[in-house]
């Protein structure tokens, strides 16, 4: 699962639109929207291309593309 907030923040920082991402990945803009919002999965090739477009450093790749959105819920006793 990708870190939607980090991806969107980086896009805003670089003034890159979803249309720009779609052109870079060779996908339709609605598909990119679904991938960025974790509705559809993003494959490694797409993640690498997006990482290049967003100028994400290799050591930061996991922060953007291997994000766990929830933690184990505590059980009440």
Image (tube, grey):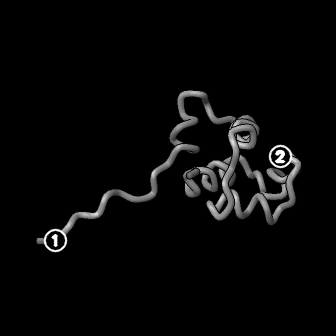
Res. 76 mark: 1
Classed neighbour count for the residue bearing mark 2: other residues with Cα under 10 Å, few (<14), some (14–19), many (≥20): some
In screen coordinates, is 42 left or right of 2? Answer: right
Give the percent coordinates (x, y) of residue 8: 63, 56
Towards the viewer: 48 or 17? 48
Give the percent coordinates (x, y) of residue 42: 68, 50
Q: Residue at x 66, y 54 (%)?
A: 41
Cα–Cα span, label 2 and label 1? 45 Å
In screen coordinates, is 32 left or right of 67? Answer: right
Towards the viewer: 71 or 51? 71
Q: Residue at x 73, y 35 (%)?
A: 52
Q: Residue at x 80, y 66 (%)?
A: 30
In screen coordinates, is 56 left or right of 50? Answer: left
Q: Nearer the viewer, mark 2 or mark 1?
A: 1
Q: Quick check: 25 above or below 74?
A: above
Under circle 2, the secondary element is helix
Give the percent coordinates (x, y) of residue 44: 68, 39
Mark 2 — residue? Answer: 25
Q: Quadrant of the C terminus?
A: bottom left
- The quadrant holding residue 24 is top right
């Amino acid at each position: 699962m990708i870190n939607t907030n980090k991806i969107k923040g980086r896009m805003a920082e670089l003034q890159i639109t979803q249309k720009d991402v779609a052109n870079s990945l060779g996908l339709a803009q609605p598909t990119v929207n679904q991938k960025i919002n974790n509705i559809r999965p993003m494959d490694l090739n797409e993640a690498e291309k997006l990482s290049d477009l967003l100028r994400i450093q290799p050591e930061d790749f996991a922060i953007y593309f291997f994000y766990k959105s929830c933690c184990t819920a505590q059980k009440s006793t």
